[in-house]
Image: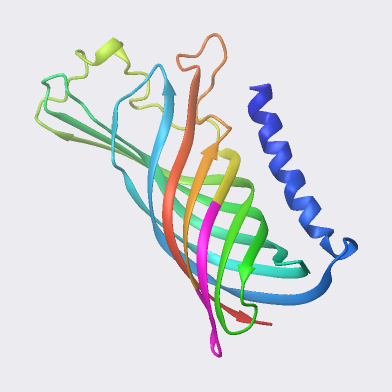
Amino acid sequence: MKKLFSIFVLSALSVGLATKAEAQVGSPRDMKSLGFNAGMGTSSVSFVPKIKQDISLGPTFGITFRHISEKYFFLICGTQLECNFAGRGWTELIEDGSGNEYTRNSYYVEVPFFAHLGIGREVRGFQTYLNIGPQVGYLIGEKEIFGGREPWNPSNRPNNVTDQYNHAIENKLDYGITAGLGLEMRTGIGIIGFEGRYYFGLGNIFGITKKDYFARCANSTISLRAHYMFSL
């Protein structure tokens, strides 16, 4: 856990260094952009003991603010802040012959804070970029879906892992690190971009003390999203 916390701190420090880019040797910039983003993601929860999972899709959308502060040789440096709604959760792959189906949908407000590093054209043309930094989220709702063959019977689950059923998420505050690779087209009417992003959760949705069942139960997501931004 200390190692995971160190990763989170290092990612936060990377953002802090980006905010001080004006003090580095390079060409200063003061370019601010505002816009919105939307996309779809596949989510899962890393459980220990393990629970087999299938693909679980959820939407994501929100607002984006970016500040470009410096160009250092060919590298365009800045920071990016977002506030997003995201659908997460997991869908179990139940193969015990019961014919049961189970999905947990969870809904978060997420705030990632990125160091933004770009290569390419600044005004007209294409630019590739990397976003990396910490993210915090807060659970605003959840829903369990029990489906499949009746009666619903979890008694034959592998390793008897059933503690997740009818167990509300205990830790509403979520945190982790996130990174994305993207491509933008800069036009006269704004910035149009596409990005693939991965989120690795460091927090756990249930308790993980000695008296609790799970040793780890953290969110992770892979998402594809598009964004449009205009200069301020």
Q: Nearer the viewer, residue 70 or 11?
A: 70
Would residue 81 be found to the left or right of residue 178 on screen? right
Q: Position of residue 16 (x, y in %)?
A: 79, 51
Question: Can residue 189 be found in the magenta stretch?
Answer: yes
Q: Nearer the viewer, residue 56 or 190?
A: 190
Q: Quadrant of the N terminus?
A: top right
Q: Main secondary structure of the magenta part?
A: strand
Would residue 220 be found to the left or right of residue 230 on screen? left
**What residue is at 32 percent from the left and 18 percent from the top?**
162
Within the image, what quadrant is residue 94 found in?
Answer: top left
**What residue is at 17 percent from the left and 20 percent from the top?**
153
Q: Nearer the viewer, residue 210 or 55?
A: 55
Would residue 159 be found to the left or right of residue 4 on screen? left
Q: Position of residue 70 (x, y in %)?
A: 78, 68
In this rendering, the answer to whether 30 lies above or below 76 is below
Residue occupying the far front of the picture? 73
Q: Which residues are magenta?
A: 180-192
Within the image, what quadrant is residue 113 found in?
Answer: bottom right
In this rendering, the answer to whether 71 lies above or below 220 is below
Q: Position of residue 11 (x, y in %)?
A: 69, 43
In this rendering, the answer to whether 136 lies above or below 207 is below
